[in-house]
Image (tube, rainbow, N blue to C red):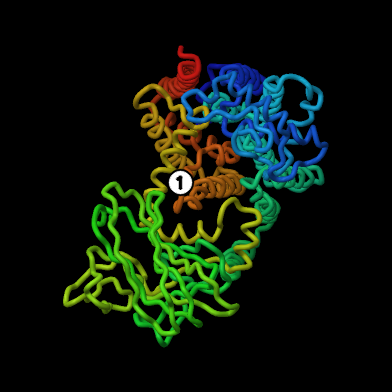
Amino acid sequence: MPSDPFTWIGILRRQSYLGLVLVLALINGLVFIKLVPPWQHYDEPGHLEYAWLIVDRMRVPKEGEYNQKMRREMAASMIEYDFFKNLDLRPNLLSQTEPIWIGPSQTRGLPLYYFLIALPLKLVQYTDITFQLCVGRAISLCLYLITVIAAYGIVRDITPNHHPLRWMVPLTLTLLPGFVDLMTAVNDDVGATAAFSMFLWAGVRIIQRGYSWQRIVALGVTTIACALTKNTVVIALILFVMPLLFVQFRKSRHRIYWTGIPIVGLFLLIALVRFGDAAYWHRDTRQRQSTNTPRADAPVGKSALQLNSSAGIFQMIPQSDLNELRGKTITVGAWIWADQPVHASLPILEYDGQKIKQMEAITRKPIFHAYNTTLPEDLTRLIVSIAPETSLEDGNRIYYDGIILASGDHSQDGVPSAQNSNATWLDWKSRSVRNYIRNASGEKSWVVFRSTVDRLLASYVPGRPDLYFSMLQDWRSVKWYYQVTLDNLLKTFWGKFGWGHIPYTVPGAYPVLAIFSITGMIAAAISLYRHRRALSIYAVAFLIISGTIIWLFTILRGLNSVMGSLFVPSSRYAFPAIVPTVLILNVGWLEISSWLKGKFGSRLLMIILLLSAICLNILAIYTITRFYYGG
């Protein structure tokens, strides 16, 4: 990498530039605090309520706990600042029995961030609730400055003196509107971002400088801080060992460490996962047994799907198949039997808020059951669920085989026969009919977490780990989700304000920012390869692995909602990885500047990048002002 394309700006060669960046971050943060009206951040009322309850109760509040008087004051403030403008909602301030609506309660969250907010709130406990919000935002601003310091510390530890990344990365954090907007809100994502950034700095410092009791304590304290702040950064409990191992790798010249990694990884993989569940069928509930089982009495193939009375699985129909099914009459059916006679549900159709099911008497012998319905023309999603919705004695199971979703009314066509073990095509009254269900009889299996591993991960990882894992193996049916999510992550990363509902007002802003992002990442990959021998390889690996895990969990976060009201995650869940992310982007942009011939071309590109960041902040301020103040 070029050592310093800004040698002509002497002030940036001195350590004082960190102070200058912090002053700029403070000013920009205060601008956003003043600019964004009260309560106009993600779940800000609920987050302040949590901290307020700590002060009021002198303890961590229980989930769902609230104070009606405080909620009344907060809701009145929300009305005063036009929070409910253009919304078909207005809280009932006179309610005595039901909690006054201020948005989702956050009392199920981890407590550390809220304790930090509660400390100064204790001093202003009896002041106006809006002023208390400003105090809470000021504490978030302090955590924002800590994050900028951590970014500088990380880059300083992995780069030589006077390297431009030492000012580029902290300055980017200062001039990234989407990031500054979040970090000046009352939100536990602020605490998660600061805690994880400090954790990364502690890890990098150990890797680069080796063991000392102070560094190990710093790593331990920041790990605990992550574990007590938010579930998005609890992964620090696992990543904690990585810097310690990397120190050993750096010290040792023996190849045993490198040859041991694949072996340990293989055994770890075997310990964590297993084959056995039916492919393309996602678990809606947990059951210890596999969802498919060999059955001698299976009408189709050699296997069937098995469920207990409380279990449920589902399959999403890919978007490409929906084009052939919209507005058509379809037939849904399956061969069903059970260990004991029961009344149970046939395969259930779910689409766009609708749910169609039919109950039938099920015997101990496989019998084909089916029903017909007509799908709407504007169908956007279609899910087939298998959920018995019945009661079975312990140890008894219900079995589904040859699940069918076929175009047309086949109610008078009798019982179909499958052309193959997967029932992808059916012979129905001398006609060949396509079955849109994949792996209809559970013949194919895929990899799933072992039940004990899944339950353990569920205690620390947001959402459903088992569902994340299966969705990763079903790209075809959830491709639309990844497209929607990546689009929203890009927009909220660079700036989409309020509760994620205020985009930039300039047409074409996000496509340009997408080009900046993609070119930066591609150029960064080239740069890392070109300079691989000069890199602090262990520190860089630690940052990239940690950042990738955070982003991956963010992308997968909304998969839990694909069956109902879709939740599309925003970049605030990935901001704990902001330092590795911004570092990668800046490495890429710095690499591009080195391709330009002559010092003037390099300097020109860097000036363009700096001016672009300033213009983006101006655009953000204009966008927020125009939306909230009509300017």
At x 77%, y 41%, the residue is 60
Report the label total: 1
| Position in image of residue 407 (x %, y %) | 24, 63
Q: Residue furthest left?
A: 430
Q: Is residue 186 above or below residue 505?
A: below
Depth order, front residue of 397/204 = 397
- Residue at left 45%, top 77%? 399
Q: Dot 1, how many residues are within 10 Å of its Cα: few (below 14), some (14-19), or many (20+)?
A: few
User: Where residue 112 sits: x, y (%)?
Assistant: 74, 40
In the image, 342 versus 289, the foreground residue is 342
Tag 1 residue: 566
- Three-letter code for the amino acid on which mark 1 is drawn: Leu
- Indicate the position of residue 147 as horizontal and vertical percent values: 65, 32
Tell me the quarter of the picture where residue 593 sits: top left
Indicate whether 291 appears above or below 242. Answer: below
Seen from this angle, which residue lies furthest top? 631
Residue 124 in the image: above or below residue 109: above
- Front-lying residue, 236 or 560: 560
In the picture shown, does residue 533 fall above or below 387? Answer: above
Q: Residue at x 50, y 39 (%)?
A: 570
Residue at 66% across / 34% down in the picture? 47
Give x and y (percent) for residue 263: 59, 68
Secondary element at image label 1:
loop
Residue 55 shows in this picture: yes
Residue 251 in view of the camera: no
Name, please, the residue furthest toward the bottom.
296
